[in-house]
Image (tube, grey):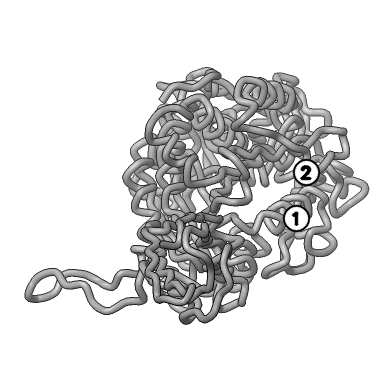
Amino acid sequence: MKTTFTYDHYYDYEELTNCLKQLCETYPDLMKMESICESEEGKQVWAVTIAKGDDTKKPAFYMDGNHHAGEVTGSMECMHFIDTIVTNNAEASVAKLLAKNTIYVIPKISPDGSDTYLHTSEKLRSVNRMYPLKNLDDGLHAADIDHNGIQAMMRVKTPYGAWKKKPGSDFLMTKRMPDDTEGEFYNIYPEGVVQNYDGLHITIGTEKWGLDFNRNYPFGWFTEYRQPGAGKYPLSNPENKAVADFVIAHPNIVTALTMHTSGGVLCYPPGTMPSDKADQEDMRMYKEIGLMATEEMKYPVVNIFDNFLADNVNYSSGAFDDWCYHTQGIPTYTVELWNLSERAGCPNQWPVKRDKSDAEKEEEYAKEMAWIQQNCPDKILPWTAVEHPQLGEVEIGGVDFKFTFQNCPNNFLLQEMEKTTAFALRHANVLPELKIEKVETEKLGDGLYQVKAVVANRGYLPTYVCNEAKHVQVDKKLTVSLTGAEIVSSSKPVESLSGFFNVKTGFRYYGIQTDNYDPCVKAMTWVVKAEEGTDVTVCMESEKCGTVSETVKLN
């Protein structure tokens, strides 16, 4: 699909803001933007609404980016997704999507942190605010020693080093063998300065900007001792609170994608317990929707706790995806965009192999370096001698981590955007779709009429969305009502409708069979008192699934 803008570089806050404003001006009846929070630097956290008509009257799909400031590929995907939808709003598939659904996008949750990442050599997790320390502690702190705008690696020659140059290469390094006693040896550190260096030992200092927005949500939150970066209390960061308030204020949000890097994988909750302890129908739902991601993006879909976390005891938590699913009943995927290892031809990365040998890791690193050399050679930084203010002569080099390992090189950005948007558009089509299939009236005599409405959900997801929503009692009931006449009696209310996800069917020994299931189509009847020719309206609605109605005459 065509786009209004080009995707060959990363947009900072100003450029992204200008692009959003241009689209709003071009498509004023379709798109609007609002600030949900102002950052400490005076930047706005923009939330975009794309809808035909009243956005609250349709089920909604949500996307966000830049919970982590350095994961700028995520904010670019949000921009590309917005651009694709509004620029192609008259194209048949997009028009059909917008006729049914609303789209909400928050492209840059951390505009301050993102700009710091893009405009300086700094690397950071979420935002450039001091946390938890007010002053730097002793030890090595990352810095651009050679003033080339990149914080790379620093190799320090020492007889006590664990590394040596790989035979035949001055650039690649290999681990020192137990019997290596002759030659040049090195230790390798982040490029930086050492606070209060004692002349003997280099220790790694605490990160100065340690806040992690994706540990600050009020589900599975732990204090700093257990979960570094979690903040003083849940939603203590104004950006996190603004995002949570936005989600809560839009109860029509059905499902969500939160964009991150890297790894080339989609992760789904739960992240605080094994998936076999979770609702198995919900887990099937995550896998089935995830198959579309694998088709479009070639990325696997894995459970967070089982396959993504490095530590299942002191696991990372307080994340947006778990909060959405376990407290709001919104199935959410964390999308880890970009996988350098996969591009470089390394073996399948998922599920993670925790016991790789040093030899395996070295082989993969060599492949990654070779890929970078071939596809973006300007990101390779040859080892170069530099006079360090504390350590004397060191060598600085390696690779520009930001736009190789963590994010796409510019020339691969569009590829990543197009395939991710292709999945997101398909994902946005899984929402419940309310439909009044027919309304029939029958005259009973003496001013009495029977009205029968057949109501349905043509969507994939049920109207309650997922079983977890019912478990935590946040599922939104349907109401099917009739107005315009005096109601004498009515049948049992219709409060929910299955989606075709709920159809119990499959391959059997004797072929394919569909079994009993709670239906996607139900009927409701009323007996009303009114004059012939009176207009009556049947309305089906819920906060989650929107509103549909049909008016007929009594005859």
Residue nearer the viewer, 225 or 390: 225
Give neighbour class at mark 2: few <14, some 14-19, many 20+ (Cα, 10 Å).
some
Q: Are marks 2 and 1 in contact (CB under 8 Å)?
A: yes
> SS at mark 2?
strand
Q: Residue at the location (49% across, 73% down)?
A: 447
Q: Is residue 473 above or below residue 428?
A: below
Query: Which residue is tagged 1?
Result: 245
Q: In this view, does 246 lie above or below 327?
A: above
Q: Position of residue 402 (x, y in %)?
A: 60, 32
Q: Earlier in the sequence, mark 2 or mark 1?
A: 2
Q: Which mark identifies residue 133?
A: none
Q: Which amino acid does label 2 sit on?
A: Ile
Left or right, 282 with respect to 216, comes to left
Q: Which amino acid does label 1 sit on?
A: Asp
Residue nearer the viewer, 439 or 125: 439
Q: Is residue 185 visible?
A: no
Q: In this view, does 326 lie above or below 407?
A: below
Q: Residue at the location (44% across, 65% down)?
A: 462
Q: Is residue 161 visible?
A: yes
Quarter occupied by residue 10: top right
Give neighbour class at mark 1: few <14, some 14-19, many 20+ (Cα, 10 Å).
few
Query: Which residue is tagged 2?
Result: 36
